[in-house]
């Protein structure tokens, strides 16, 4: 097929305004032609979606108006683009998008919900009618009983006979059987109405959600495309436009295989559709681009230092009305995202495989093309699609801060060796097949190392106790005070494998030269400046870090002793 001119291949609504002014609207040959169109693909961003719609029209020679009707009212006019193929000698004159108001459209899903709700209400009406019949029957039985047991009037003929004992027994049995049956039926009907009321309430809520705010009329967008053709023929059109109300966010399942020392990482995209258009069996692409930030870096405002002046007196309403403030939005820089993995090898027996997405890296963003078509209604619900499933070799270690919590937390360090960037998102962590914790994964680029927090492990026992704490006076003439602390931290490896534990313990930090902190145990000569030099290293803010390797069943005791000295007449905070 022959490609259309460049003006037809990509035309935005912004350029259409100029085209219309130069060429004028002109007169189309015949009435506007409403062209059926179908959604073909969706690209989802963090705060919007770009929809691709296709249409085919048979056009005559001359000028024609092609109408794409019933598009979302939230369509962003500035994002509208039209392209076409299939017929040589066609010129795009202009594209126009306008808002139209229509009566409530016969949405098939809306009709189904309304029919279901009507059926439930008819069932409730039938139950209510049967309950009324039961009440009438019970009332009639009560009247019979009253009539049979009431004494005869005084002026009644004395020959009126009273019921015999056998007749009384039959009456009581009749009343008991019928009243019991009606009571049981009444309870059953009331229970059915109660259950039905819950179903009706749920159906009404779902119907109101689909209806939106329940307005009798709603707006749509209608796009009119005016073309001029040298000869009649078939034209294939493609329209793309952005709409708000759609988004996607990353989510992860990280499953640690303890024996294999590896992590099965599954990368998902959680998609939400509230655009006003249902997506049915569409090709889906997830993009990490952030169009809302703009395309350029923000302008830096001047940093002005001046003499402080008193604020002017507030203006009254008349003075304030004379001022108008116009705010110009500023663009912000777009940022990069990150992280991924590599295909998982088949296990025995073979696990259920996930349909993975293909990735395309651009200059400022990445896109994930979901291989399986997606169906998602426009009701604000979410759907999770798989982007990547990979197995990553992991380096495991435990971290503990017993002063804050006597527990050891498992941490896995892995390398993203794939071409997939992983965005920041929530991670559901599993230890083999047991869920242990939820944590957060920072953005990681391909080739970057990252850590995963996998929760506490009771197999590593951690205890911290205060061995001694005493206060003493120091000095002969200038009396001072010294507080000495002794702690004992005990680590026990109850696992069947050797494990590395990173232990952190805090040492007081002095903010005044009159307060002197001395670390007595461990000795300063045993502390290294960087990891790998010695078992103990010093970290910022007075933290000491031990990197300890424990054999299976091994127990290790770490003593810590320190002192804090200050003048006796000086009030000191932070001493325990």
Image: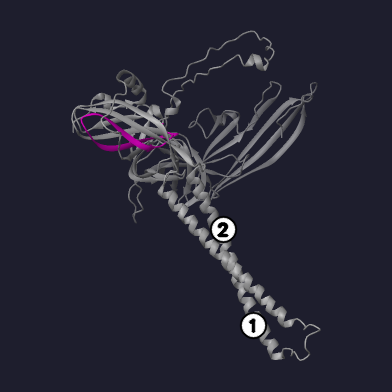
Q: Is residue 129 magenta?
A: no
Local crowd at mark 1 within 10 Å, few (<14), some, or many (≥20)? some
Residue 54: in magenta span: yes
Q: Nearer the viewer, mark 1 or mark 2?
A: 1
Please state the horizontal and vertical placement of residue 508, each as a whole percent of the image. 65, 30
Q: What residue did someone put label 2 on?
A: 197
Q: How many marks?
A: 2
Disc marking residue 493: none
Judge whether residue 448 can be spotted in this image: no
Q: Which residue is mark 1?
A: 174
* Type of secondary structure dominating the magenta stretch: strand
The type of colouring in the image is one colour
- Quadrant of the rendered image containing residue 68: top left
Q: Are the residues at dot 1 and dot 2 in contact (C-beta closer than 8 Å)?
A: no
| Residue 312 in the image: above or below residue 365 | above
- Magenta stretch bounds: 47-75
Give the crowd class for mark 2: few <14, some 14-19, many >=20 residues within 10 Å: some
Q: Is residue 83 left or right of residue 321?
A: left
Circle nearer the N terminus (1, 2): 1
User: Closest to the observer: 284 or 240?
Assistant: 240
Residue 87 visible here = yes
Is 316 on the left or on the right of 490, as rendered?
right
The residues tagged by marks 1 and 2 sit, at their Cα atoms, a distance apart of: 34 Å
């Amino acid at each position: 097929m022959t490609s259309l001119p460049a003006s037809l291949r990509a035309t935005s609504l912004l350029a259409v305004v100029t085209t219309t002014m130069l060429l004028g609207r002109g007169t189309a040959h015949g009435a506007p032609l409403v062209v059926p169109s179908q959604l073909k693909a969706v690209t989802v961003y963090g705060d919007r979606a770009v929809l691709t719609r296709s249409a085919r029209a048979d056009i005559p020679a001359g000028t024609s108006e092609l109408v794409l009707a019933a598009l979302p009212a939230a369509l962003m006019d500035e994002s509208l683009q039209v392209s076409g193929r299939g017929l040589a000698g066609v010129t795009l004159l202009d594209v126009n998008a306008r808002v139209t108001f229509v009566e409530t459209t016969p949405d098939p899903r809306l009709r189904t919900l309304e029919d279901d709700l009507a059926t439930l209400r008819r069932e409730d009406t039938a139950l209510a009618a049967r309950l009324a019949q039961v009440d009438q029957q019970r009332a009639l039985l009560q009247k019979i009983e009253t009539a049979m047991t009431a004494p005869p009037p005084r002026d009644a003929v004395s020959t009126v006979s009273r019921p015999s004992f056998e007749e009384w027994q039959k009456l009581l049995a009749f009343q008991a059987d019928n009243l019991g049956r009606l009571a049981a039926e009444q309870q059953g009907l009331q229970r059915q109405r109660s259950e039905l009321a819950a179903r009706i309430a749920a159906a009404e809520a779902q119907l109101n959600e689909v209806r939106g705010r329940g307005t009798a009329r709603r707006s749509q967008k209608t796009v009119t495309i005016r073309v001029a053709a040298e000869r009649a023929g078939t034209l294939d059109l493609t329209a793309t436009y952005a709409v708000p109300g759609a988004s996607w966010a990353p989510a992860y399942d990280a499953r640690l295989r303890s024996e294999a020392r590896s992590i099965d990482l599954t990368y998902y995209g959680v998609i939400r559709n509230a655009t006003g258009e249902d997506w049915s069996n569409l090709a889906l692409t997830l993009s990490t681009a952030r169009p809302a930030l703009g395309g350029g870096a923000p302008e830096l405002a001047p940093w002005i230092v001046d003499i402080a002046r008193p604020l002017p007196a507030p203006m009254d309403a008349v003075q304030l009305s004379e001022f108008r403030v116009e705010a110009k939005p500023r663009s912000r820089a777009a940022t990069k995202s990150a992280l991924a993995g590599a295909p998982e090898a088949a296990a025995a027996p073979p696990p259920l495989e996930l349909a993975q997405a293909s990735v395309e890296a651009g200059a400022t963003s990445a896109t994930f093309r979901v291989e399986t078509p997606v169906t998602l209604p426009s009701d604000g619900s979410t759907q999770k699609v798989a982007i990547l499933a990979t197995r990553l070799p992991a380096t495991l270690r435990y971290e503990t801060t017993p002063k804050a919590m006597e527990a050891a937390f498992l941490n896995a360090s892995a390398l993203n060796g794939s071409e997939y960037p992983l965005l920041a998102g929530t991670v559901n962590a599993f230890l083999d097949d047991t869920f242990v914790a939820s944590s957060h994964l920072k953005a990681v680029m391909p080739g970057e190392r990252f850590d995963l927090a996998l929760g506490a492990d009771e197999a590593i026992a951690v205890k911290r106790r205060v061995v001694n704490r005493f206060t003493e006076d120091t000095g002969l003439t200038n009396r001072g005070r010294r507080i000495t602390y002794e702690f004992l931290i005990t680590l026990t490896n109850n696992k069947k494998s050797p494990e590395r534990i990173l232990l952190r313990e805090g040492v007081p930090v002095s903010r005044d030269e009159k307060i002197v902190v001395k670390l007595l145990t461990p000795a300063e000569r045993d502390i290294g400046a960087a990891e790998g030099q010695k078992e103990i290293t010093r970290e910022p803010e007075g933290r000491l870090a031990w990197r300890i390797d424990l054999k299976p069943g091994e127990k290790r005791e770490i003593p810590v002793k320190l002192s804090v000295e200050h003048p006796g007449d000086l009030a000191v905070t932070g001493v325990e």
